[in-house]
Image: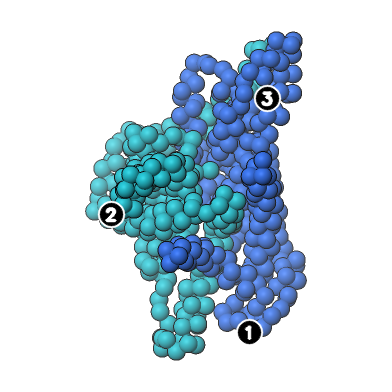
Chain colours: A blue, B cyan
Amino acid sequence: MKKKIFKNIFIILVFIFLYLPIIALIAFSFNDSKLNIVFEGFTFEWYKTLFTNTTLLESLRNTLIVAITSTVISTIIGTLAAVGLTKYNFKGKNLINSLLYIPVVIPEIVLGISLLSIYTLMKLDLGLGTLILSHIAFSIPYVIISVRTVISSMNWQIEEAAHDLGASDFLTFRKVILPEIVPGIISGATLAFTLSLDDVIISYFTTGPGSNTLPLQIYSMIKTGITPDVNALTTLIILFVMIILFTSTIIQVRKIKKGYRV
Amino acid sequence: MNKTLKFILLAPVIIYALILILFPILYILVLSFQTSDNYGGIIYAFTIYNYIRIFDPIYLKVFLVSGIFGFFVTLACLIIAYPFSIFVSEKKPHIQKLLITLVLIPFLTNSLIRTYGWIVLLRKEGIINTLLSNLSIIDNPLSFMYNNLGIFIGLTYTLLPFMILPIYNSVSKIDKKVIEAAQDLGAKPLSIFFKIIVPSTYSGIFNGCIMTFIPAIGMFFIVDLLGGGKIMLIGNLIKNQFLVSRNWPFGSALAIFLIVVTLVLVKVYKKLGGKMDDLGGF
């Protein structure tokens, strides 16, 4: 019994550590003091000023444009690739497979500076375009890994059956393979989207003047002075992430519980 | 028909892997053998000077400091994550799922935002100091940040989930029947832990260590914001070579060095039986 209490206390302490800075920000987003230092009283003021802070809103818009575009493109390429790399053999397949792990294992800063170098070499203007390209670059491997996990547990006999019944390759891909791997595609896309929202390091090197994303905007604000409406915006973002994650978990937990009853 | 489908499935990923992964890495490899003109330009003439320069005591010190920080941050994450993962894996399946989601939420909120949260907590007029002085525990505010401690807290905090996820994955795969069998045969808890649990989680542990150690030495913004610009890790050094001193060839040589270190670690991980798809624990 004592052991169990100790274990639960340990788990709780780890969660306190993980949530401490988030709770601090949420609390300060309702703080009356402009200095952001001492808690003086409760207010919604910062949520109101947030919607007049055009720099902040513009960086939020940039973040969303980059995240949505790069997620859509990397999910499409990644899904096609996961199926293709499982189904077919070709010369140089091993090379491609090992290249795909590079963005996952090397430090982000290395990918950031090497992308910056080729953009400069190719004389590309740094901005939203190069940001999207860079986010696609680090997202695709994660999508491939997510989709491949589902494919490896897939029953390939149904594909053969579809063939035997006269379905063309395209039809089999669209009607048989694709529906089977949807869970992998969804988790891959979610991962790509959150990685894009979260990215600081690669964006730092591959963006240009005037196209700051939210993390980069906050980075420069921390150095020059942060206004309390940033706390308000972060609180809204954290709520958004929590809602998405909790909905997906509740669905999964229900599935696990159903499995018990059977 | 078959060929068209094969083309559609494979052409995009091949183009992507060659242009956005292979080409950039090869290009910085080429850059690392060139010289800078000190104005941000590159003089194309083969030299190994940049690699010799890495062994300059000034830079060796940066490597040493990075290694020490990386080591202690990884160790701290391991000490927190290992028992945590074991305790969580003893819960009922749906509670496990819920707890791991709770780990994921901060992990998926922007790391810079969370670093800012630590600033709010740790600075001289911050929440922790205010609380301690209001409770009359301290007279003068303690320096939690703009020093090594700040960097250590920031890195450990940010990288902890990277350690928890792979370890939890490997711990939750251990067959409970093996442990029960050992108990029935009279094995003591300690020998069960060291002879069954730890060995079956080697690849998870090493996976977590790679995913903690490598980012730790590259996360320049945490070092900048919580270290107050006094301490430099490899990440800060590379960043400065690219954006401040504008010596891209030397910065590239440093990046190539980091790639080599990473590849060696990954090789060891594969030797231990780790699967590449499990890296990162997603």
Tell me the distance, in whole angstroms, between the alpha carbons under discs 3 and 1. Answer: 58 Å
Mark 3 = which residue?
A177
Q: Position of residue A123 (x, y in %)?
A: 56, 38
The chain that hosts pointer 3 is A
Crowding around mark 3 (Cα neighbors within 10 Å: few <14, some 14 to 19, many 20+) is some
Please determine if labels 3 and 1 lie on a single subunit: yes
Q: Is residue A101 left or right of residue A55?
A: left
Badge number at residue B79: none
The chain that hosts pointer 2 is B
The chain that hosts pointer 1 is A
Residue under the point 34% across and 36% down: B272
Residue under the point 43% across and 67% down: A2
Mark count: 3
Closer to viewer: mark 2 or mark 1: 1
Say which element carries label 2: helix
Mark 1 = which residue?
A40
Residue under the point 50% across and 32% down: A100
**Is B42 above or below relative to B70?**
above
Closer-to-camera residue (B196/A166) = B196
Closer-to-camera residue (B99/A6) = A6
Q: Position of residue B135 (x, y in %)?
A: 48, 87
- Residue A59's quadrant in the figure? bottom right
Mark 2 = which residue?
B64
**Is B178 above or below relative to B219?**
above
Say which element carries label 1: loop
Please determine if labels 2 and 3 lie on a single subunit: no
Residue type, numbered disc 3: Ile
Marks 3 and 1: CB-CB under 8 Å? no
